[in-house]
Image (cartoon, rainbow, N blue to C red):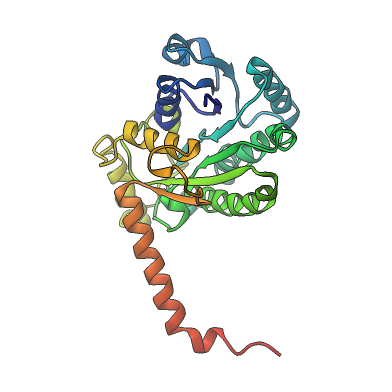
Amino acid sequence: MSSVWLITGCSSGFGHDLALCALKRGDKVIATSRGNVEERLVDLKQAGADVLALDVTADPTELECIAKQAIGIYGAVDILVNNAGYVLQGAMEENNAEDIQKQFNANFFGVINVTRAFLPHFRERKSGAIAMIGSRGGFMGFPGVGSYIATKYALAGLTECLACELRPLNIKVTCIEPGDFRTSVWKGDNSKKPARHIPDYDETAGVMAKHLTEDFHQPGDPIKGAQRIFEALKGEGFARGKTLPVRLALGDDSYGNILDWSARRMTEAKEWKEWSTGTDF
């Protein structure tokens, strides 16, 4: 059955590749981006997508108007994918308060406000799927991207709560947590350098900064990743007949990292059981 997708952040990366994947599978796509979408999303429009300007950091009232406009195109939106965001680099002390706030506005509060704008429509229809594009960084921390990681932890927590609230309404919610894919996540507007450099962090945050200069050597194929996201949200392929998890690892590295992280947490919990327990009245 054909579905209508609305995807944020479609000018590059997973947003762009997922939009193309959905179009090729015969679905309808409303592709969004900041700025001049006629230029930024020209290839998606040529491929058959409807394009809308949508800045996730806009005022909630404006986002509600954009949501109504989007719903009016086909009369419904079946799948909402919150993909827009960027990476703020640097050790926490190297980031200023303004940059950290902007990071949360785009990666977390923007997701909340876009989702809230569409929720009345999903509730009315008692159906649909809402996906957050998180990160394996929503499970574990890395030096040099603390603000970004914090937004992904927050996004994972939001997803788990939202899934509980919307499950009785037959609305699926998931946080897809990719590992390293060859997207443009570290290029241009998708990544921002820290406000200042502190040499004491060269062996931690500095190592991550060097790693980020090796962009486009990541193991993950974004086209394959987009295909997996499509199948999970549509319940096709491997996902057919399965319950969509609230948190879903994407990529060999993400899968392995999350298993390792979970094992370490289990080991720590058991080692510290005597300290953790015995505090009840």
Residue placed at 50% from the left, 48% from the top? 244
Instruction: Evaluate whether residue 55 shows in this view.
Output: yes
Residue placed at 47% from the left, 84% from the top? 272
Residue placed at 32% from the left, 39% from the top? 181
- The answer to which image quadrant residue 192 occupies is top left
Residue placed at 25% from the left, 42% from the top? 219
Give percent across and percent down for residue 191: 43, 35
Rendered position, 279 above or below 204: below
Give percent across and percent down for residue 193: 42, 38
177 to the left or right of 168: left
Give the camera-side residue of 272 and 49: 49
Rendered position, 58 above or below 208: above
Give percent across and percent down for residue 248: 45, 50
- The answer to which image quadrant residue 63 occupies is top right
- The answer to which image quadrant residue 69 occupies is top right
Give percent across and percent down for residue 161: 64, 54
66 to the left or right of 192: right
Q: Which quadrant: the C terminus?
A: bottom right
Rendered position, 61 above or below 233: above
- Badge count: 0
Instruction: Evaluate whether residue 145 shows in this view.
Output: no
Give the camera-side residue of 75 and 274: 75
206 to the left or right of 80: left
Rendered position, 178 above or below 125: below
